[in-house]
Amino acid sequence: MTEYCQFMHWQAEIVELHDFFEEYFLGRIASLARAEAAFGPKFTFVGPNAETRNRASVIQMLADGHAHAEQLKITTTDHQLLLESPDAIVATYVEHHELADTSNHRLTTVVFVPDPDAPNGLLWHRAQETWMTE
């Protein structure tokens, strides 16, 4: 770990937030508190179809998706650190969604900013997904 990593557990944050998403979309968790604690006040999300959402819109999208899946497995792989500084971390990973009758995969780039009160010491500042083919 570099000198900046004392508060930055970026890979754990990616895995833990996606574990939360899986449990939330399956209806096993009812509260959005974990996501709300992770997303910074200026969080933006660019979905794989290029739609851009602010923090409030993402929280609403999550609320609307609660317990929408009977079968779902979300995993992340291929975690790569692209940039690390005292002010930000930029990383990529591949997100896999396995549903009962289909699957999809997205390459995601994320920008984190440090915050000692956030889960794993990081706030999600921006995430951008791109569809991947099989």
Image (cartoon, rainbow, N blue to C red):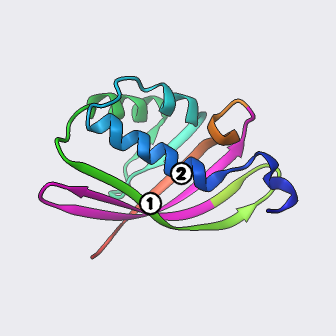
Quadrant in the rendering for residue 53: top left
Taking depth in this image into account, of 40 and 119 the one nearest to the observer is: 119
Residue 35, percent from left and from top: 48, 33
- Report, in whole angstroms, how far the alpha carbon at label 2 lies from the one at label 1: 8 Å
Of all residues shown, which one is farthest toward the left? 101
The tag on residue 14 is: 2
How many residues crowd around disc 1 within 10 Å: few (fewer than 14), some, or many (20 or more)? many
Residue 132 point in image, percent of width and height: 34, 71
Q: Quadrant of the N terminus?
A: bottom right
Residue 30 position by quadrant: top left
Please say if 57 is above or below 131.
above
Q: Give the secondary structure at mark 2.
A: helix
Which residues lie in the magenta part? 91-116
Contact check, label 2 and label 1, Cβ < 8 Å: yes
Residue depicted at 45% across the width and 28% down the height: 56
Q: Name the image quarter holding the C terminus.
A: bottom left
The residue beneath circle 1 is: 76
Q: Amino acid at mark 2?
A: Ile
Is residue 87 shown in magenta?
A: no
Image disc number at residue 116: none
